[in-house]
Amino acid sequence: MTRVAAVDCGTNSIRLLVADVTVSDSASGAGATGELTDLDRRMTIVRLGQGVDRTGRLAPEALERTFAACREYAAVIKELGAEKVRFVATSASRDASNRDDFVRGVLDILGVEPEVISGDEEAQLSFAGAASAQREHGDARPVRTLVFDVGGGSTEFVLGSQSAAGATVDAARSVDIGCVRLTERHGLTGEPLTDEQIAAVRADIGQALDAAAGAVPLTEADVYIGLAGTVTTLAGIALELPEYDSAAIHRSVLTYDQVKAVTHRLIHATHDERAAIPVMHPGRVDVICAGALIVLAIMERTGARELLVSEHDILDGIALSVA
């Protein structure tokens, strides 16, 4: 057993997982599988990707918000005595011309260099995290699975097979559509979206899905799994939860009709109406409309009638990779 710390720094949020990892050989011979026992899991909205789509640079105030969260996480990691730490940075820091400033700041605070990973590696880590959740139920049958991870700056698609014995990835693709990127690109101010804004966002999403489909067969899965804050927030709204409840959301099922109804509600609501939804994190109020339109478009393109919601995602994949 190894105690590890995993940090996932995306366009909108930075998250920490400190966990004990037990690793064993896969019965199928496909490699190692692991089980995670969470010790601390937390998330902070820092909006690192603020303005990156427009300027190509990380804003000074966005860097400082991120470094403040890193200082908090460093204290937790030290207190819990993690033996190994891996810090993974994704879309915003990939795109930024001044990402060296980000790398130096994280190294100074946490003592580890952030890995600015490719979209393909991000996709595979997301799949590994989602597969760990699927293995909780011990299904020995290989299940053809499409995992998609809707982030702030990009969305990852991974097609593979998973079972109790482990997971294999067949195809992966990252495309540059995310809730923050599309919100900023199309000037979504937080008020109800106009028909023109909806059409423009959907056109961007459609082009990105065309690109994804060139690398990943989007309609060949038996199971569709959605990851990250947009998907879990949609699930919480559909379940009419009185507050955000990870246990209730994890492994819940969203139908296409539910996603369509919740998306319609969100894009026609005011900022204050969205903020009043009990499960809505304040840092998602202004970007949830773009995220919901991405999820709806994915279900339309794939023909998925149901979507399995997972709280286990790239963060869990990073923790497993450390061990």
Image: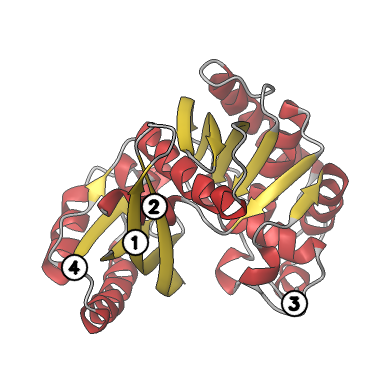
How far apart, in angstroms, are the residues tagged by discs 2 and 3?
A: 39 Å
For residue 276, which numbered disc appears in the image? Answer: 3
> Which residue: 15% across, 60% down?
112
Q: Mark 3, mark 1: which one is toward the viewer?
A: 1
Three-letter code, disc 1 = Val
Q: Earlier in the sequence, mark 3 or mark 1?
A: 1
How far apart, in angstroms, are the residues tagged by discs 3 and 1?
A: 38 Å
Q: Quadrant of the N terminus?
A: bottom left
Dots 3, 1 in contact, CB < 8 A = no
How far apart, in angstroms, are the residues tagged by discs 3 and 4?
A: 41 Å
User: Where residue 254 appears, x then y in whole percent?
Assistant: 78, 51
Q: Residue furthest front?
A: 27
Q: Earlier in the sequence, mark 1 or mark 4?
A: 1
* Residue at disc 4, secondary structure: loop
User: Where residue 39 appears, x then y in whole percent?
Assistant: 39, 76
> Which residue: 25% across, 57% down?
86
Three-letter code, disc 2 = Gly
> Which residue: 24% across, 82% down?
75
Task: Say whether residue 243 is left or right of residue 321.
Answer: right
* Residue at disc 3, secondary structure: loop
